[in-house]
Amino acid sequence: MPSRVSKKKKVSEANLPIIKCFCGAKILLVPDVKLMSKAIEAHAEAHTKKIKPKKEAEAEAERVRDYLIAKVLDKASED
């Protein structure tokens, strides 16, 4: 018997594996490594667009990548 989704919880988030960036953005966890890599890179790029000095932007991108990769590994180890 299927469980009902609470009205407070969005259907799109019902049982989907997601990781959450420290900025609040949610990224769907998918079993394709290349696709996950592209999603993380795209999000890291979005963070860099908010920062002017190139050196600081690169440091922020690295920080975002490291954080999201750790989240992916944590989520994958839960199952």
Image: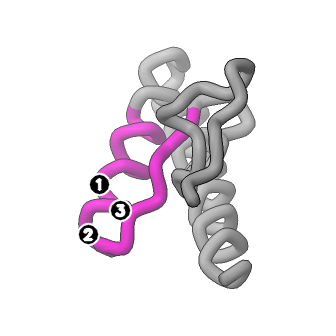
Q: Residue 34 at x, y = what percent?
A: 26, 69
Residue type marked 2: Lys
Magenta: main secondary structure equals helix
According to the picture, the residue beneath numbered tag 1 turns out to be: 38
- Image height check: is 17 above or below 28? below
Rendered residue at 37%/73% (across/down): 31
Secondary structure category for the residue under label 3? helix
Which residue was labeled with disc 3?
A: 37
Give left or right: position of 49 versus 56.
Answer: left
Mark 3 touching mark 2, by CB under 8 A?
yes
Element under disc 1: helix
Q: Is residue 34 left or right of residue 51?
A: left
Residue 3 at x, y = what percent? 63, 50
Give x and y (percent) for residue 36. Answer: 36, 61
Q: Residue at x 59, y 26 (%)?
A: 10
User: Pointer 2: what residue?
Assistant: 34
The C terminus, quarter of image:
bottom right
Do the CB atoms of the residues marked 3 and 1 lie less than 8 Å apart?
A: yes
